[in-house]
Image (tube, helix red, strand yellow):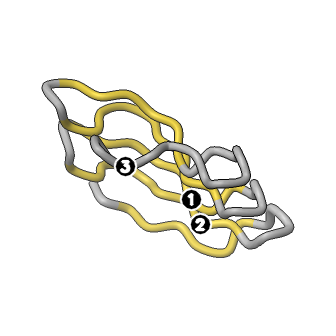
Amino acid sequence: MLGVDPFYDNGKPRFKGSYKNNEMHGFWEFFRKDGSLMRSGSFDEGKQTGVWKTFDRAGKLVKETNFS
């Protein structure tokens, strides 16, 4: 997400992850403005891969999506 501020205006992170060749690559986490984990999973040079998990605000797993 090059060009997108990785932090909300309250200082909490929007997302954490790394890049390869300017593409999202490896394990990523996406957060809500309140700091709770919303979604996590992996990218392979910009493409979602493997199992992605979605969580509710309390941290409970609510969905798994397989991109393999």
Amino acid carrying mark 1 in the image = Arg
Query: Disc 1 marks which residue?
Result: 39
Q: Do residues under tags 2 and 3 come within 8 Å of each other at their CB atoms?
A: no
Q: Secondary structure at mark 3?
A: loop
Q: Badge 1 local density, few (<14 within 10 Å), some, or many (20+)?
A: some
Mark 3 is on which residue type?
A: Val
Q: Is residue 21 above or below residue 38?
A: above
**Residue 17 versus residue 48 in the image, above or below:** above
**Closer to the N terminus: mark 2 or mark 3?**
3
Of tags 3 and 1, the one toward the viewer is 3
At horizontal 73% and vertical 53% (from top left) the residue drawn is: 10
Farthest right residue in view: 58
Crowd class of label 3 (few under 14; some 14 to 19; many from 20; radius 10 Å):
few
Q: Could you tell me residue 66's position as x and y percent?
A: 38, 62
| Relative to 16, 58 lies left or right | right
Circle 2 or circle 3, nearest the eye: 3
**CA distance separating discs 3 and 1:** 17 Å
- The numbered dot on residue 54 is 2
Query: Residue 51 placed where, x, y %?
Result: 44, 54
Helix, strand or loop at label 1? It is strand
> Disc 3 marks which residue?
4
Rendered-image quadrant of the C terminus: bottom left
Residue farthest to the front? 9
Q: CA distance from mark 2 to mark 3?
A: 21 Å
The answer to whether marks 3 and 1 mark residues whose Cβ atoms lie closer than 8 Å is no
